[in-house]
Image: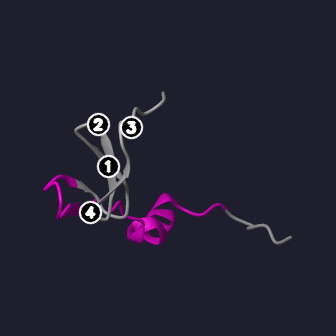
Amino acid sequence: MAHPKRRHSTTRRDKRRTHYKVEAVTLATDSTTGEVHERHHAHVFEGNLFYRGKMIVEGYRPTV
């Protein structure tokens, strides 16, 4: 395995890492309930679990 002969400077390391950015979560509005939720994720509204505008589970209680 190759090993560097000399230590890389912090500037050189930081230049390489400049493109690693945190992106904001994409939000969507449910057509049925009007609830704003994370895109491609199920969400709870009035005790029911919804996904893509359809009720998946009635009387949903999340476990911790």
Residue 40's quadrant in the figure? bottom left
Residue flagged by tag 3: what amino acid is it?
A: Tyr
Up/down of 20 relative to 49, above or below: below
Q: Position of residue 7 (x, y in %)?
A: 64, 60
Residue flagged by tag 2: what amino acid is it?
A: Gly
Q: Are dots 1 and 4 in contact, CB under 8 Å?
A: no
Where does label 3 land, which residue?
60
Where does label 1 land, which residue?
43
Q: What is the crowding at mark 2: few (fewer than 14 residues within 10 Å), some, or many (at least 20)?
A: few
Q: Residue lying farthest left?
A: 34
Residue flagged by tag 4: what amino acid is it?
A: Gly
* Residue range of the region highlighted in magenta in the rendering: 7-36
Inter-mark Cα distance, 1 to 2: 10 Å
Q: Which mark is residue 47?
A: 2
Q: What is the crowding at mark 4: few (fewer than 14 residues within 10 Å), some, or many (at least 20)?
A: some
* Residue depicted at x 42% and y 33%: 62
Q: Quadrant of the N terminus?
A: bottom right
* Residue depicted at x 36% and y 54%: 42
Closer-to-camera residue (49/25): 49
Q: Tell me, what colour scheme is on the image?
A: one colour
Q: Residue 64 carries which label?
A: none
